[in-house]
Amino acid sequence: MSDKKPHIVEIGQGGRIHLPKDVMKSLDAGPGNQIRFEIGEDSVRILRHQVKDPFAEAAKKKTPGIQELMSQQEARKKEAADLFAKGMQEKHEIRPEDREDFWR
């Protein structure tokens, strides 16, 4: 058992409890944080629930500089121009329904 003084709190309406300040401090928790209760046979542990930050991964990514963005744009433009040129060189079949007088 711990040598620290136990905290006794009253259960309020709806099963609510108020955590003392030093308990909140030891959990490194504050308003808006989540806590987790682990239920044992004769005890309950209160732990801080660590929520995975959905933006943490994006924050780690390196932001590309203007030169890198411009070179990416130029590469996409060149790729589109090459694809267009290739399409222009291909022989296209003209179907009867493509002719204007077909529909008259």
Image: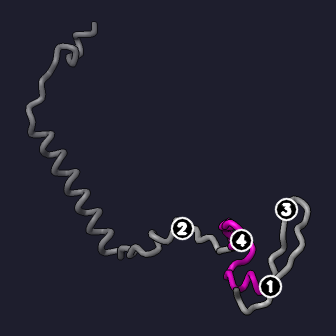
- Residue linked to disc 3: 15
Q: Disc 1 to disc 2, how far (Cα)?
A: 31 Å
Few, some or many residues within 10 Å of mark 4 (<14, 14–19, 20+):
few
**Pointer 1 or 2: first along the chain:** 1
| Vertical position of residue 71 compared to residue 28: above or below | above
Q: Position of residue 66 (x, y in %)?
A: 35, 74
| Vertical position of residue 95 compared to residue 64: above or below | above
Few, some or many residues within 10 Å of mark 3 (<14, 14–19, 20+):
few
- Residue linked to disc 4: 43
Quadrant where the C terminus sits is top left
- Residue linked to disc 2: 52
Q: Amino acid at mark 3?
A: Gly
Q: Amino acid at mark 4?
A: Ser
Q: Disc 4 to disc 1, how far (Cα)?
A: 13 Å
Q: Secondary structure at mark 2?
A: loop
Q: In the picture, residue 78 is in which quadrant?
A: bottom left
Q: Secondary structure at mark 4?
A: loop
Few, some or many residues within 10 Å of mark 2 (<14, 14–19, 20+):
few
Q: In the picture, residue 6 is in which quadrant?
A: bottom right
Q: Tell me whether the residue at label 1 lies in contact with that at label 2, contact meaning CB atoms closer than 8 angstroms.
A: no
The residue at the point 19 percent across, 51 percent down is 81
**Pointer 4 or 3: first along the chain:** 3
**Start and end of the magenta stretch?**
21-45
| Vertical position of residue 47 compared to residue 16: above or below | below
Q: Is residue 57 shown left or right of residue 19?
A: left
Q: Secondary structure at mark 1?
A: loop
Front position in the image: 73 or 58:
58
Front position in the image: 16 or 45:
45
Q: Tell me whether the residue at label 4 lies in contact with that at label 2, contact meaning CB atoms closer than 8 angstroms.
A: no
**Pointer 4 or 1: first along the chain:** 1
